[in-house]
Image (tube, helix red, strand yellow):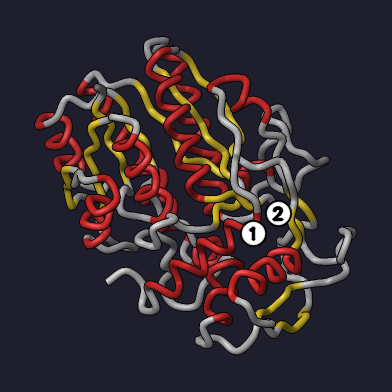
Amino acid sequence: MSTILVTGGTGYIGSHTCVALIQAGYDVVVLDNLYNSNKVVLDRIKEITGTKPKFYKTDILDRDGLDKIFEENKIDAVIHFAGYKAVGESVQKPLTYYENNISGSINLYQAMRKAGCKTIVFSSSATVYGDPEKCPITEDSKVGGTTNPYGTSKLMNEHILEDVCVSDDDWSVMLLRYFNPIGAHKSGLLGEVPNGIPNNLVPYIARVANGTLEYLRVFGNDYPTPDGTGVRDYIHVCDLADGHIGAVKYALEHKGVEHVNLGTGKGYSVLDVLHAYEKACGKELPYKILDRRPGDIAECYADPSKAKKLFGWSAKYDIDEMCEDSWNFTLKNPDGIQ
C-alpha cells in the first residue's frame, strides 16, 4: 500500500485524517512541530486504529529536516495540513503567517521534487472565495478578494501549485477547499482543542456548555438570512477526513490539478448550531447579540457535487451528530488532549 506523509498530522483535521488513512490501509508518516497540538494524539490514533504512525517532530521551515524524512521513507503522496490558521492572528502577524504558510510550503514542495514525489493533496479553504457572488459556491466561482493573510496564504499556495503543474505535467495536485469543519471522533479521543479563547463557533459554544465561558457572542442578527445570523456550511471532521481518502486515491491515479469543495451543501445559521448544541448537551445556552464583525459575510455554503463526481465522496453526518460528537469530546476531555 502507498505511504502518505501527513504534515500537521497531530492537529485537528490532520489527526482525524491519519485515522481514516490507516483504516483505509495506507502507511502513514506524520510531520508536526507540535506548535498547536500534543504528541499524545499519536497514542490516541493508535488506540483507535491499532497502529501508531511514524512521527517526525519537524518544522516545514527546516529544509534539512524535510529532506531527512524523504530520504528515510519512500513517500508516495503528501497531504499538507501544516500551517498557522487563526484568521484574527494572521491580521496581527502577517509576516509570521506568510513565512510559515508560504515559505514553509515552498520548502516542502522543493523537498518533494528533489525526492521525486509529485503527488499532493493541499488543505485549502473556502476563504479563497472571499465574499461569494452567489451560493451555493462551485469550484468555478471567482477566487480572490481574500480579507486576511490566512486566506491569502491559502490562495497563494493554490497559485504556486497550479504553476508547478504547468511547469511539470508529472505532478498531481488536489486543492481541497474546506468549508467549516466541526465535530470530533465518535470515540471522544480526538477533537478540536483551540489555544486560549476559541475563535471558531463550535469550540466556543462547547466552552459555554461546560461552564468555562459565560455566554455565546453572536456577531450580528441583521444579515439577509432566515434568522438574521450568519450562515455557514458546517461539515463533520470525520466526513472531511474521508474526503481526503478519496482525494489521495484519485491523485495517485491521475495527473494535473483539481480544485474540489468539501462541504455538505447545506447552510446552518449561528442560532441553528446553538440550538443543535443545546439538544446535544441537554440544556439551554445563554447568548448575546453583538454588532457584526468587520469582514464577516452573510452566507457561505458549498456545491459539493464535484467531489461526488470525481471520487464518489459526499458528507454523511448532519448538524445534530456534529454537535453530539463535539459535546462527547468536550465531556471526556475537559482540559483538552493531555
Residue 121: where, in percent of width, then height?
Answer: 42, 31
| Image height of 101 relative to 37, above or below | above
Query: Disc count in the image?
Result: 2
Asked whether residue 157 is in view, the answer is yes
Q: Is mark 2 on a helix, strand or loop?
A: strand
Q: What's the residue at 60%, 47% (across, down)?
A: 317
Is there CB contact under 8 Å for labels 1 and 2? no
- Residue 232's disc number: 2
Q: What residue type is labelled 2?
A: Arg
The image quadrant where one finds the N terminus is top left
Q: Indicate left or right for 51 with 305 as reference.
A: left
Residue that sits furthest to the front in the current view: 282
Task: In this rendered view, identify the residue nearer to me: 249 or 185.
Answer: 185
Task: In this rendered view, identify the residue nearer to me: 94 or 133.
Answer: 133
Residue 184: where, in percent of width, then height?
Answer: 46, 58
Residue topped by disc 1 = 320
Q: What residue type is labelled 1?
A: Asp
Q: What element carries label 1?
A: helix
